[in-house]
Amino acid sequence: MVQKRTVAVVNCGSSSVKLDVFFLPSEDNPLSVLVERVGKPDARLVLKRASAGGEPEHREDRAVEALDPATAVSLVLDAVAAAGFAPDAVGHRVVHGGERFTESVLVDDGVVAAIEACVPLAPLHNPANLAGLAVARARLPNVPHVAVFDTAFHQTLAPEAYLYAVPRALHEQHGVRRYGFHGTSHGYVAERAARFFGRDPSTLNLITLHLGNGCSACAISRGRSIDTSMGMTPLEGLVMGTRCGDLDAAVALRLARERGVDEAERVLNKESGLLGVSRTSQDMRDLERAAAAGDVDADLAIRIFTRRAAKVVGGYAVLLGEVDAVIFTGGIGENSARVRREVCAGLRVLGALLDERRNASDLTGERDLAGSDSRVRILVIPTDEERAIAGETARLARI
Ligand code: ADP
């Protein structure tokens, strides 16, 4: 019998810290601990335990004092130990690996220094990721720690895909280029899709659409990312919950001139996207409900969202030459029949024909929604970044 190993996956952000415990090789997820509202006076710790069959067994929800991510990670690790779990390895989600990290790595002091060097590229994310690494390494010094980067999957992009048409010195001196994000998710759903077809990833051309609060698309040629819609930061590309996505750079300059740089950054990151256009919500469920009830602004926000996504998929089809499947994932991609219908309506030109009945049905899990006469398959593959990180961690830690 294969020995059961325990992997903890830490996702340490600036406002929330999450830790998932996985058993491998079964991939069961018996414990999940979240500290929300980190840095706020009303921070809470939510713990969920599940049985071997995945049934919820126990839930705890209590106020905690967590004024910074490091304290929150400490609280989460206390809860894991109190629940009786002892990880054999720890996987850490790290948002930005710059040009240095082309794949996941075992963490040592040199790796930590290199992640620190990427802080200017992700000033909101990498410091929290580093805090998580520091606390977890200090608390669990005798187990391997693995860093899994959101950017690594896209390090296969060619210069013509990652360079912006700006002076080359900006790349050389300031690291200005496309990095791309959501790499763990794009890589994971592409691999699941290959398994779904019973084929090797190196034989497939795929377009993946990760549509959640953050949204990005990726063109994957024979297992390698050749283009992706997020750029130097996660602000570029598709319309998102509160981020604008693609925009004339002059809009940002003008906003910065008139309202100051911080305010410009806030407006484009936090007040734009679905929220900005609809004026009411960043949440696709709310918008669909409102649109169905006649709210024209909600309806317009959804149409701008789906049009942009279709446009990007069309562009990627040209880059790939041939497309085997378009894959929807993320909260919206997995659940919104309207979004899938509107994105796919424009893809008939590629020979991608959606089976409307299957699309609108309440099927769940991995599924093919293409009609039998479609030349391109249209898949829904639920993403699971934590599970993917657990797998990567076990592989690198050789446990
Ligand atoms: P995150 O990027 O924070 O992980 P998710 O992937 O969970 O977010 O996606 C959140 C988005 O998914 C929200 O806009 C939410 O409204 C949308 N969503 C979730 N369920 C549905 C549904 N049944 N129909 C439409 N949209 C949904």
Image (cartoon, rainbow, N blue to C red):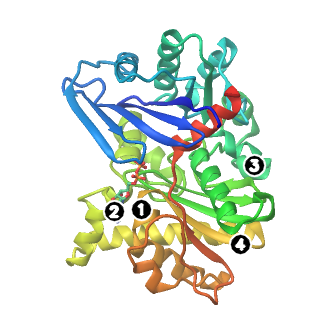
Q: Is mark 2 within 8 Å of ligand 1?
A: yes
State the separation of the CA atoms marked 2 and 1. 7 Å
Task: Work out whether 330 lies above or below 122.
Answer: below
Observer-nearest of 239 and 144: 144
The residue type indicated by label 4 comes to Asp
Residue picked out by circle 3: 157
Up-down relation of residue 48 to residue 384 (above or below): above
As helix, strand or loop, the secondary structure at mark 3 comes to loop
Q: Residues within 10 Å of mark 3 (few under 14, many from 20)?
A: some
The quadrant of the picture occupied by the N terminus is: top right
Q: Which mark sits nearer the N-terminus, 3 or 2?
A: 3
Residue beneath label 1, please? 332
Image-quarter location of ligand 1: bottom left
Q: Please name the residue that numbered disc 2 is placed on.
A: 284
Answer yes or no: do the residues labelled 2 and 1 have beta carbons within 8 Å? yes
Asked if disc 1 and disc 4 are in contact, CB closer than 8 Å, the reply is no
Compute the Cα span from label 3 to label 2: 31 Å
Label 1 C-beta lies within 8 Å of the nearest ligand 1 atom: yes
Query: Can the viewer see residue 97 in this picture?
Result: no
Q: Which of the two labelled residues, at mark 1 and mark 4, occupies the earlier sequence position?
A: 4
How far from the left and from the top, in percent, is residue 103?
Answer: 71, 36
